[in-house]
Amino acid sequence: MLFVISSLDRKDALELRLATRQAHLAYVRDNQSVRLGGPFLDEAGNMVGSLIVFEADDLAQAQAFAENDPYTKSGLFESISVRPWKSTINACGAEF
């Protein structure tokens, strides 16, 4: 089952994000269940949040992944949402 983890950074937290980024990237890369991910950007191109598509058996497993992310543990996020998600269109526009 797929889940979307959507997180928004606290205001003025870019330095914290940059300081924690390598640990976050290592955490994500080490997890075989991550399908897609990347930062949200503001108008100036600065990172201000994160989106991760994650495969898990259930919501609790996806929430545990989000809670153990170094970004979450550092206090970077103002808000975090973990929701079930269904892919219906791939990058080529084909429906499943």
Image (cartoon, grey):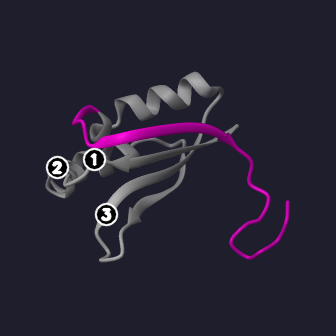
Residue type at mark 1: give it: Arg
Instruction: Indicate the secondary structure of the residue bearing disc 2.
Output: helix
Residue 16's label in the rendered image is: 2
Which residue bears the numbered disc 1? 10
Residue 1's label in the rendered image is: none
Q: Calculate the distance from the C-alpha at mark 3 to the C-alpha at mark 1.
A: 11 Å
Region rendered in magenta: 73-96
Residue type at mark 3: give it: Met
Q: Is residue 90 above or below residue 5?
A: below
Residue 47's label in the rendered image is: 3
Q: Which of marks 1 and 2 precedes in the sequence?
A: 1
Q: Is residue 22 above or below residue 74?
A: below
Q: Calculate the distance from the C-alpha at mark 3 to the C-alpha at mark 2.
A: 11 Å
- On the image, the x and y values in percent for residue 61 come to 55, 25
Quadrant placement of the N terminus: top right
Tell me the crowding category of disc 1: few under 14, some 14 to 19, or many 20 or more residues within 10 angstroms, Cα based.
Answer: some
Residue type at mark 2: give it: Leu
Q: Are circles 2 and 1 on residues that touch, CB within 8 Å?
A: yes
